[in-house]
Amino acid sequence: MRIRKIIGALLLAVCTAEAWGQTVIHDTIYIMEPQIKQAVTARMVGFGHSNILDTYLSPEKYTGPEVKYISHTTYRKTGRQMSTQIINQGSFAYTDNRSGNGREMAGAYNFGYGRHYNWDLRGGDINIKAGLMAEMMLGFIYNTRNSNNPAQARANFCLSPNASAQYKFSLHNRLYILRYELNIPLIGLMFSPNYGQSYYEIFSRGNYDHNIVVTWPGNAPSMRQMLTVDFKLGRRTFRIGYLGDFQQARVNQLKQHVYSNAIVLGMVL
Amino acid sequence: MRKLRKILGLALCTLLPFVSSCVDEEQYADNPKGNFEALWHIIDEHYSFFDYKAEQYGLDWDDVYRRFSRQISDDMTEAQLFEVLGNMLKELRDGHVNLYSSFDIARNWSFHEDYPSNISDSLINKYLGTDYKIAGGMKYRVLDDNIGYLRCASFQHEFGNSSITNILNEFLACNALIIDIRDNSGGMLTSAEELAAHFTNEKLLVGYMQHKTGKGHCDFSAMEKQWLKPAKGLRWQKKVVVLTNRQVYSAANEFVKYMKCCGAIIVGDQTGGGAGMPFSSELPNGWGVRFSACPMYDHQKQSTEFGIAPDYKIDMTSADFYRGIDTIIEKGRKVAVGK
């Protein structure tokens, strides 16, 4: 009899605890239910042509092949209008002058973090987003034949309005996504030696002279645009497209441009 | 949609400056006229001693254009063009100014070619003997009158603080030190500073440096002070003599400038100068150009472009040479012991 009472009390306790537990769990689910975060990452390699001018190094333009690696990720939670975009990009160009007896090598790493507002139209087949990217670039241009001005360090930070539009469509029972993205640096800071200033003065002597310059489209009219098509092949989604990256600066009476046109190929994960 | 329209409008406004302004540079044609124009403009916009040389010997770069542009014609050969452009650059009377082609280097080395060489390798070898030591690329030994002799022929490489300390350690018991930098035509300013830093116990103002801030002949930054900080290793506390000739140039000229501030006595001939740190550029046909870009001054803000006068001006004599005596080293030894 006593045992039955004890078992009854234990059962009641367990049931109560379970009922309380369910309530808690249910409540937690109700409050904390995570929105499904969609992450779309495209990893691409680019092959293209680069045109480099840096009057600190030479008044001549250098042209030649360029390779790139781009990682382009978008995060967006289901039902949310805001999304996050992260871009990592590395590039290397090996270029010649027009007489063919001089070389310039240019390398750069770009990191961009942006937040966008999304508009989904026609049931989500069309997506337009616009927002702001914070971008950072570190790089160099090295001229193989110069003496005390052999290289130009490239470093800048900027805020860039960024917009993209993508359109999902099917053709011959295949789904395609056509995407165009435009990025235009609006305001930022960049490093530059002064017109005839040597790196010896800056780094050995610590003589700084307008070496951090505010940039805006008037003195650094730059843009990056990318047009791509995503398509499925087997179970995988591939991306192919064009990347045009046009970086320019006119600061401290020095002119610099790095124009790059590349075909990009990659995989969407 | 209204929000979207606003954003698109803003994007268009941002695009406008881009569309209207490509950052580009005029490319001169790759022909005699184009290469002449490119060279004249590179020097006109970047060279750092126009005003100083106008004062010193009446250099007029516009007049140089008038005189030399007449010598350019479309049918001239590469060699003829090189000769004319080289002659134009010679007007600058600057050892840091060169034109480089695959077949020649145009230069004006009158800073040492017009003067006695005041050096003999054979005699230096005689003084060094065969049992000298080498550290940091420099040769050194103690001479028989207990004076340390250090032969520093170049500033092309870093010496290393420990190498200089070891050299000075070898000379600890010496009465004085002679640093022979004759025919040292320069190299890295940092190497010149590295060596000179072992001859001061305190931070010294040794000169000034500036750079161009624009294309105009007078567009310069403020003169920034050049400080020489004492080295962390062993520092020389006794008398030091620096031997010079006309081929002491560029970074070696700077070394003499620093050493004068450290109390060194300069013996020999005037230095060659070369007080402008050179930059490089190029012509449409690929010929390289080098020119003085960042002028440097002594601690009294005087240019050392045409050299630094010695405390004891002395030339090597033929009579001494034939007797196996280096007149300048011997004078240095006398000065070092106060004779």
Image (spheres, grey):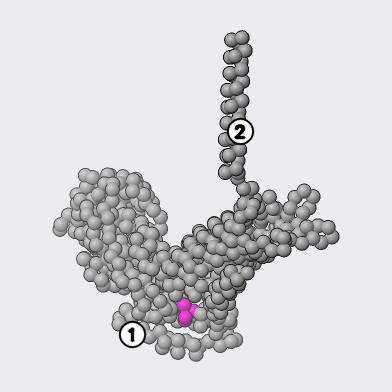
Q: Residues within 10 Å of mark 2 (few under 14, many from 20)?
A: few
List the residue tagged with mark 2: A22
| Main secondary structure found in the magenta portion | helix
Locate residue B119, reporting x and y percent.
33, 63
Which residue does the image show at 51% across and 82% down from the upper left? B36
Mark linked to residue B58: 1
Q: Is residue B248 left or right of residue B279?
A: left
Q: Is residue B12 above or below residue B141?
A: below
Identify the image quadrant of the C terminus of chain B: bottom left
Which residue does the image show at 66% across and 59% down from the upper left? A46
Q: Chain of mark 1?
A: B
Q: Is residue B246 left or right of residue A266?
A: left
Q: Nearer the viewer, residue A125 or A147?
A: A125
Q: Write the start and end of the magenta stretch as one range.
A: B39-43
Alpha-carbon distance for marks 2 and 1?
Answer: 98 Å
Q: Helix, strand, or loop for circle 2?
A: helix
Residue type highlighted by circle 2: Gln
Q: Residue furthest left?
A: B339
Q: Nearer the viewer, residue B53 or A269?
A: A269
Locate residue B17, reporting x and y percent.
54, 77
Q: Helix, strand, or loop for circle 1?
A: loop
Q: Residues within 10 Å of mark 1 (few under 14, many from 20)?
A: few
Locate residue A139, reporting x and y percent.
52, 60
Q: Nearer the viewer, residue A146 or B255?
A: A146
Q: Is residue B184 left or right of residue A2?
A: left
- Is B279 in the magenta? no
Which residue does the image show at 58% across and 39% down from the upper left? A27
Q: Is residue A30 above or below residue A205?
A: above
Q: Residue furthest top?
A: A1
